Image (cartoon, coloured by chain):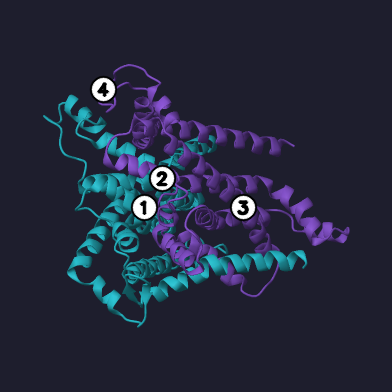
Amino acid sequence: MKTSDHSGYQGSAIKKLGSVLFISAVLAYLYAPIAVLVVNSFNSSKYGHSWRGFTWKWYEKLLNNGNLMDAFWHSLTIGLLAATLATMLGTFMAYALYRYKFALKKATSGLLFVVMMSPDIVLAITFLVIFMALGIHLGFWSLLIAHLTFCLPFVVITVYARLNGFDGNLIEAARDLGASETRTFFSVVVPMSMPAIISGWLLSFTLSLDDVIVSSFVTGPGYEILPIRVFSMVRVGVSPEVNALATGLLIFSVALVVLAQLILKKGKSQ
Amino acid sequence: MDFRRLIISVTLAWLTVFVFLPHMLLVGTSFMSPDADHLVVWPTTLANFEKVFTPVYFTVFWHSLELAAIATLVCLLVAYPFAWLLSGFKQRTQAILLFLLILPFWTNSLIRTYAIKIILGKKGLINSALVSMGILDEPVQLLYTEFAVIFGLVYLLLPFMVLPLYSSFDKMDTSLLEAGKDLGANALQRFRHIILPLTMPGIISGCLIVFLPAMGMFYIADLLGGAKNLLLGNVVKNLFLVARDWPMGAAFSVIMMLMMALLLLMYAQANKLVSKKGGLNDENL
């Protein structure tokens, strides 16, 4: 018995080792290309085939590349605005779906589902078609509306799940105590859904910054955003400024996520 | 206007104008005739759908399906064991690993595709590693091949496959496996009759959110594929933005929508199988 126990223990140790190795290998695959970008952003060699010493020059070039920096600020603006508006609208939608009965309720969740599941390329075209039909100029507004819309379902799902998780009697109690529907929403529902609202915002911001496909279709010459600019830079050759940009974006995002985690934790402990 | 009416009408108005109408317009466009000046003109026609099956378009369409299917399969083969092993770790470790899995998303996917282009080059990370390990005598052409496109697709889409699979494994009742073992089922039988059916909804939803988007990722084909390895996204983008044949582009989009509907139907079926009365996840059991 003793030996079989022992071999069982060894077997599980090998299993454990195997699973750690496999998971590390997959993560290495995900991080290796990014690591190469980060390292090359400090590499004097333009093509990055070998290490030629440390430099900040690509960061200087990045900051002096007016078009690229403009595109960066534009992307950030669209991301912040789209995420904020999508979070507001999405929270309203989630609450409407959670609390009220209305005609076309099924259709509403169906449409949100369609937005979530449609491949980006199909969504991109539907946006292009409607902007043309409504005469909306391609540029800032088209980008904002498109980004806002494709972020919506993710906010709705996150907030709706949270609303479903808490005691509906609290809303009734607020109403019984004389709070109006509006007051109940802003003083009871919003504070209680805050963690979901923050996650929804973060998710939307990420989706907006990550998007290439929808943006390529609804962008206009007057308002160039990051993916379009970067695309024209990296299509032809190597651009070390892009490495510097990628590193900057990564640090920015990680900082944002850590900050959000801190806020969420603080919210929980209160 | 009271609060209730306000939020309901804003919801309905936004979704009607920016989701419902656009989809209807797109379907409508696919039955119209192309026109260089006005984009879309009467009369209605089925010609666009017929053109999909002419050799010029069908070859690209089929090749794009193949590339996306292989990428989806590779994602599944990597993500399935990954999600399975992941669900075996302690809660806290799971959370950290999931975080690491989605962290790369915070850099734009185009920039990550560019990173792939760098490491697949003749002097890139992969070639130099293989040469220095003595596996290759000299660098091989990886960039601008089918391999590069599939590599890029898997790279960008893998986490999307892991997440639904992970949620299936996470929900799985492990006592069923114990029961199977007690009743004398061997490891293969337990996998075939318990684990696989229970994770089927995860498999299908993973494939759903990888396969169709994979066909649309034109920038991967542009940066990594060369002229011969186009995806459907490249064709659609070209039809809309360069050739300005909107009806033809719309026809391809409608076909993608139909494929999505089909996959969703399969997903609903698999879900029903798992949660039907007397089925594996029947809550009344």
User: Which one is in front in this view, the residue at disc 1 or the one at disc 4?
Assistant: 4
Q: Is residue A230 left or right of residue A198?
A: left
Q: Residue furthest right?
A: A177
Residue drawn at x 34%, y 34% as measured from the top left:
A33
- The amino acid at mark 4 is Ser
Q: Are marks 1 and 3 on the same chain?
A: no
The x and y percentages for residue A102 are 67, 72
Crowding around mark 2 (Cα neighbors within 10 Å: few <14, some 14 to 19, many 20+) is many
The alpha-carbon separation of the residues under discs 2 and 4 comes to 27 Å
Label count reads 4
- Who is closer to the viewer here, A104 or A8? A104
> The C terminus of chain B appears in which quarter of the rendering?
bottom right
Label 4's element?
Answer: loop
Q: Quadrant of residue A49?
A: top left
Label 2's element?
Answer: helix
The residue pinned by badge 3 equals A85
User: Which one is in front in this view, the residue at disc 2 or the one at disc 4?
Assistant: 2
Q: Are marks 1 and 4 on the same chain?
A: no
- Chain coloured purple in this rendering: A
Is residue B80 positioned above or below B27 on the image?
above
The alpha-carbon separation of the residues under discs 1 and 3 comes to 46 Å
Crowding around mark 1 (Cα neighbors within 10 Å: few <14, some 14 to 19, many 20+) is some
The residue pinned by badge 4 equals A50
> The N terminus of chain B appears in which quarter of the rendering?
bottom right
- Who is closer to the viewer here, B15 or B156? B15
- Chain coloured cyan in this rendering: B
The residue pinned by badge 1 equals B191
